[in-house]
Image (cartoon, rainbow, N blue to C red):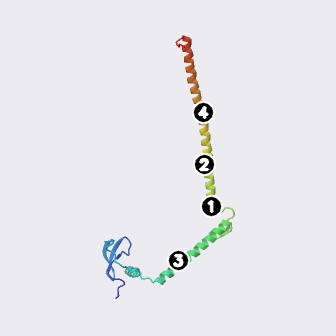
Amino acid sequence: MTTLSPAGWYPDPDGGTRLRWWDGEDWSDHFRTRTLHTMPDAIDPKAAMQAAQQAAGAAIASRDIDRIVGAVQSSTRTEVDRAMGELQQAARGEVVRGVGEGRRQGGNVQPLISETVSDITRYVRWAFIIGVLLVIAYFVFQVIAGIGIAELVGDIADRIIDAVDDEESLGLLSG
């Protein structure tokens, strides 16, 4: 039996950051952490991949892999095209197949962007109304507070003037 790559420490085919010992024919149960000095100077990536596939028992030919990937891509493309066609029909209000029957989706299909814009517009409108109410409340408060301060200053000034007048009338001020 020929070996695919020489015995040595290779990246663990099960994943992770550790190294696993390849004895030339099979993976052992011996592990080691990676360091700069434990990596072989030159690892043949194709040989390591083939060894990992053989060790895992998954020796799938690359043409089989390409065929499988192509089939998945093709079926995915077909499904996406079918779904896009149905969405476009629904957006235009054309006949959409329901559960076993066709039905007309007239004006009740609203594109997602319109719904989002309408939500944003509603939130902006409410924010504007709240902002206007807060500005009005601020100015009303300033007017009320301004009137209150003016009355307080006026009362204090009146008391001082009354006190000065009282002292003059009693003759306490010499002037």
Q: What amino acid is at disc 4?
A: Ile
The span from disc 1 to disc 2 (Cα, nearest Å) is 21 Å
The span from disc 4 to disc 2 (Cα, nearest Å) is 26 Å
When asked about the image quadrant of residue 146, the answer is top right
Q: Which residue is mark 4?
A: 144
Marks 3, 4: nearer the viewer = 4
Q: Quadrant of the N terminus?
A: bottom left
The span from disc 1 to disc 3 (Cα, nearest Å) is 31 Å
- Residue occupying the point 55% across, 20% down: 160
Badge 4 vs badge 2, beta-carbon distance below 8 Å: no
Query: Is residue 20 shown to the viewer in this render?
Result: yes
Residue density around tag 2, few if under 14, some if 14–19, many if 20 or more, within 10 Å: few
Residue density around tag 4, few if under 14, some if 14–19, many if 20 or more, within 10 Å: few
Q: Earlier in the sequence, mark 1 or mark 3?
A: 3
Q: Earlier in the sequence, mark 1 or mark 2?
A: 1
Percent coordinates x, y for residue 100 in the rendering: 63, 71
Q: Which residue is mark 3?
A: 72
Percent coordinates x, y for residue 21 in the rendering: 32, 77
Percent coordinates x, y for residue 30 in the rendering: 30, 75
Q: What amino acid is at disc 2?
A: Ala
Indicate the secondary structure of the residue bearing disc 1: helix
Q: Is residue 62 above or below residue 153?
A: below
Q: Earlier in the sequence, mark 3 or mark 2?
A: 3
Indicate the secondary structure of the residue bearing disc 2: helix
Q: Residue furthest front?
A: 175
Residue closest to the eye, 136 or 114: 136
Q: Residue furthest bottom?
A: 1
Q: Which residue is mark 2?
A: 127
When asked about the image quadrant of residue 163, the answer is top right
